[in-house]
Image: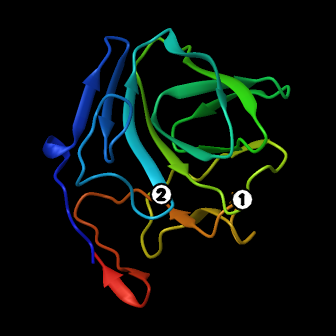
Amino acid sequence: MIEHHSFENLGKANHGWLNATHHFSFANYYDPEKMNHGELLVINDDRIAPHTGFDTHPHRDMEIITYVRKGAITHKDNKGNEVRTTTGSVQVMSAGTGILHSEYNLEDEETNIFQIWIKPKTTGINPDWNMAEFPKQPVSKNLPLLVSGDSKAPLNINQDARIYVGRLNKGDEITHNIFGKALF
Protein backbone atom coordinates (compact mmCIF):
# COMPACT_ATOMS: atom_id res chain seq x y z
CA MET A 1 0.00 0.00 0.00
CA ILE A 2 1.23 3.48 -0.84
CA GLU A 3 0.76 6.10 1.84
CA HIS A 4 1.06 9.77 0.90
CA HIS A 5 2.60 12.28 3.32
CA SER A 6 2.43 15.89 2.15
CA PHE A 7 5.71 17.79 1.93
CA GLU A 8 4.47 20.25 4.54
CA ASN A 9 4.02 17.42 7.09
CA LEU A 10 7.51 15.94 6.76
CA GLY A 11 10.29 16.44 9.30
CA LYS A 12 12.25 19.69 9.03
CA ALA A 13 15.66 20.81 10.25
CA ASN A 14 17.14 24.22 9.44
CA HIS A 15 20.81 24.52 10.37
CA GLY A 16 21.34 27.85 8.61
CA TRP A 17 23.68 26.46 5.93
CA LEU A 18 21.50 23.33 5.50
CA ASN A 19 17.72 23.31 5.24
CA ALA A 20 16.66 19.64 5.33
CA THR A 21 13.32 17.90 4.90
CA HIS A 22 13.23 14.31 6.20
CA HIS A 23 10.82 11.75 4.77
CA PHE A 24 11.76 9.30 7.57
CA SER A 25 13.04 9.78 11.11
CA PHE A 26 16.61 11.06 10.84
CA ALA A 27 19.13 12.82 13.09
CA ASN A 28 17.14 14.99 15.54
CA TYR A 29 13.80 14.42 13.77
CA TYR A 30 11.87 11.48 15.21
CA ASP A 31 8.43 10.26 14.22
CA PRO A 32 7.59 6.65 15.18
CA GLU A 33 5.17 6.51 12.21
CA LYS A 34 7.97 7.39 9.74
CA MET A 35 10.92 5.16 10.62
CA ASN A 36 11.87 3.56 7.29
CA HIS A 37 10.40 1.51 4.47
CA GLY A 38 12.09 -1.90 4.59
CA GLU A 39 15.72 -1.44 3.58
CA LEU A 40 15.06 2.19 2.58
CA LEU A 41 16.24 4.21 5.59
CA VAL A 42 16.61 7.82 4.44
CA ILE A 43 15.16 10.16 1.85
CA ASN A 44 16.24 13.71 2.61
CA ASP A 45 15.47 16.76 0.50
CA ASP A 46 18.47 18.97 1.33
CA ARG A 47 19.02 22.60 0.38
CA ILE A 48 22.64 23.57 0.90
CA ALA A 49 23.70 27.22 1.01
CA PRO A 50 26.47 28.43 -1.32
CA HIS A 51 30.06 27.70 -0.25
CA THR A 52 29.02 25.36 2.59
CA GLY A 53 28.60 21.65 3.03
CA PHE A 54 29.28 18.47 4.95
CA ASP A 55 32.81 18.24 6.36
CA THR A 56 34.73 14.96 6.12
CA HIS A 57 32.84 12.22 7.96
CA PRO A 58 32.68 8.39 7.92
CA HIS A 59 30.13 5.93 6.57
CA ARG A 60 30.12 2.15 6.74
CA ASP A 61 27.88 -0.53 5.21
CA MET A 62 25.41 1.85 3.58
CA GLU A 63 24.33 2.52 -0.01
CA ILE A 64 24.09 6.30 -0.45
CA ILE A 65 22.52 7.78 -3.56
CA THR A 66 22.58 11.52 -4.22
CA TYR A 67 20.41 13.04 -6.95
CA VAL A 68 21.24 16.68 -7.69
CA ARG A 69 17.99 18.55 -8.34
CA LYS A 70 19.55 22.02 -8.66
CA GLY A 71 23.09 23.36 -8.55
CA ALA A 72 26.06 21.05 -7.97
CA ILE A 73 27.64 19.03 -5.18
CA THR A 74 31.37 18.29 -4.98
CA HIS A 75 32.26 14.92 -3.47
CA LYS A 76 35.74 14.13 -2.15
CA ASP A 77 36.74 10.89 -0.40
CA ASN A 78 39.74 9.04 0.98
CA LYS A 79 39.70 6.65 -2.02
CA GLY A 80 40.86 9.44 -4.35
CA ASN A 81 37.49 10.38 -5.83
CA GLU A 82 36.87 14.10 -6.26
CA VAL A 83 34.04 14.98 -8.63
CA ARG A 84 31.49 17.76 -9.13
CA THR A 85 28.00 16.32 -9.75
CA THR A 86 25.59 18.72 -11.47
CA THR A 87 21.82 19.18 -11.87
CA GLY A 88 20.05 16.06 -13.10
CA SER A 89 22.96 13.74 -12.33
CA VAL A 90 23.32 11.04 -9.71
CA GLN A 91 26.22 9.78 -7.62
CA VAL A 92 26.28 6.50 -5.70
CA MET A 93 28.53 5.47 -2.86
CA SER A 94 28.76 1.97 -1.42
CA ALA A 95 30.37 2.67 1.93
CA GLY A 96 31.22 -0.99 2.54
CA THR A 97 34.07 -1.55 5.02
CA GLY A 98 34.29 2.20 5.54
CA ILE A 99 34.87 5.43 3.67
CA LEU A 100 35.60 9.03 4.67
CA HIS A 101 34.05 11.72 2.48
CA SER A 102 32.90 15.31 2.30
CA GLU A 103 30.26 16.96 0.15
CA TYR A 104 30.27 20.68 -0.55
CA ASN A 105 28.24 23.18 -2.48
CA LEU A 106 31.11 25.19 -3.97
CA GLU A 107 28.68 27.14 -6.16
CA ASP A 108 27.45 30.74 -5.86
CA GLU A 109 23.83 29.52 -5.64
CA GLU A 110 21.89 27.15 -3.41
CA THR A 111 22.19 23.43 -4.24
CA ASN A 112 19.21 21.11 -3.80
CA ILE A 113 19.77 17.35 -3.52
CA PHE A 114 17.81 14.24 -2.71
CA GLN A 115 19.93 11.96 -0.56
CA ILE A 116 18.79 8.35 -0.22
CA TRP A 117 20.27 5.74 2.14
CA ILE A 118 19.60 2.04 1.64
CA LYS A 119 20.87 -0.83 3.78
CA PRO A 120 23.18 -3.06 1.70
CA LYS A 121 22.31 -6.70 1.03
CA THR A 122 25.92 -7.68 1.83
CA THR A 123 28.07 -5.99 4.47
CA GLY A 124 31.84 -5.65 4.48
CA ILE A 125 32.35 -5.09 0.74
CA ASN A 126 35.04 -2.82 -0.69
CA PRO A 127 33.90 0.82 -0.78
CA ASP A 128 32.97 2.17 -4.20
CA TRP A 129 31.85 5.50 -5.67
CA ASN A 130 30.52 6.37 -9.10
CA MET A 131 28.43 9.00 -10.85
CA ALA A 132 26.65 9.43 -14.14
CA GLU A 133 25.27 12.33 -16.12
CA PHE A 134 21.73 11.85 -17.32
CA PRO A 135 19.75 13.52 -20.11
CA LYS A 136 18.24 16.83 -19.10
CA GLN A 137 15.25 16.54 -21.46
CA PRO A 138 11.82 15.82 -19.96
CA VAL A 139 10.54 12.25 -20.27
CA SER A 140 7.48 11.58 -22.38
CA LYS A 141 6.79 7.83 -22.03
CA ASN A 142 8.93 6.04 -19.45
CA LEU A 143 10.99 6.98 -16.43
CA PRO A 144 14.60 5.94 -16.99
CA LEU A 145 16.19 3.45 -14.60
CA LEU A 146 19.16 5.25 -13.05
CA VAL A 147 20.27 3.02 -10.17
CA SER A 148 19.80 -0.69 -9.52
CA GLY A 149 21.29 -3.68 -7.76
CA ASP A 150 21.05 -5.98 -10.77
CA SER A 151 23.48 -4.30 -13.22
CA LYS A 152 20.61 -3.17 -15.46
CA ALA A 153 21.17 0.54 -14.78
CA PRO A 154 24.07 2.93 -15.42
CA LEU A 155 24.77 3.04 -11.66
CA ASN A 156 24.86 -0.03 -9.42
CA ILE A 157 24.34 -0.47 -5.70
CA ASN A 158 24.67 -3.43 -3.34
CA GLN A 159 20.92 -4.00 -2.83
CA ASP A 160 17.91 -5.35 -4.69
CA ALA A 161 16.48 -1.92 -5.43
CA ARG A 162 15.73 0.27 -8.44
CA ILE A 163 15.59 4.05 -8.65
CA TYR A 164 13.84 5.79 -11.53
CA VAL A 165 13.97 9.56 -12.05
CA GLY A 166 12.45 11.85 -14.62
CA ARG A 167 11.15 15.34 -15.28
CA LEU A 168 7.83 15.99 -16.95
CA ASN A 169 6.70 18.97 -18.94
CA LYS A 170 3.85 20.83 -17.25
CA GLY A 171 0.57 19.08 -18.05
CA ASP A 172 2.21 15.83 -19.22
CA GLU A 173 1.32 12.52 -17.59
CA ILE A 174 2.97 9.11 -17.67
CA THR A 175 2.12 5.75 -16.16
CA HIS A 176 4.87 3.88 -14.29
CA ASN A 177 4.17 0.25 -13.36
CA ILE A 178 5.47 -1.03 -10.02
CA PHE A 179 4.76 -4.61 -8.98
CA GLY A 180 2.16 -4.80 -11.74
CA LYS A 181 0.25 -1.74 -10.49
CA ALA A 182 0.17 1.59 -12.30
CA LEU A 183 1.19 4.72 -10.42
CA PHE A 184 0.30 8.14 -11.72
Residue 159 x %, y %: 65, 64
Above or below for 16 versus 115: above
Residue for point 19% across, 46% down = 7
Above or below for 51 versus 181: above
SS state under label 1: strand
Badge 1 or badge 2: first in the primary sequence: 2
Q: Nearer the viewer, residue 52 or 85?
A: 52
> Left of 120 or right of it: where is 175?
left
> Left of 133 or right of it: where is 21?
left
Residue 17 x %, y %: 38, 12
**Cβ atoms under marks 1 and 2 closer than 8 Å:** no
The residue to which callout 1 is attached is: 156
The amino acid marked with disc number 1 is Asn
Cα distance, mark 1 to mark 2? 16 Å
Residue 112, labelled with which disc?
none
Residue 42 x %, y %: 44, 46
Residue for point 14% across, 42% down = 8
Q: Nearer the viewer, residue 5 or 98?
A: 98
Q: Quadrant of residue 153?
A: bottom right
The residue to which callout 2 is attached is: 40
User: How did the renderer colour the structure?
Assistant: rainbow
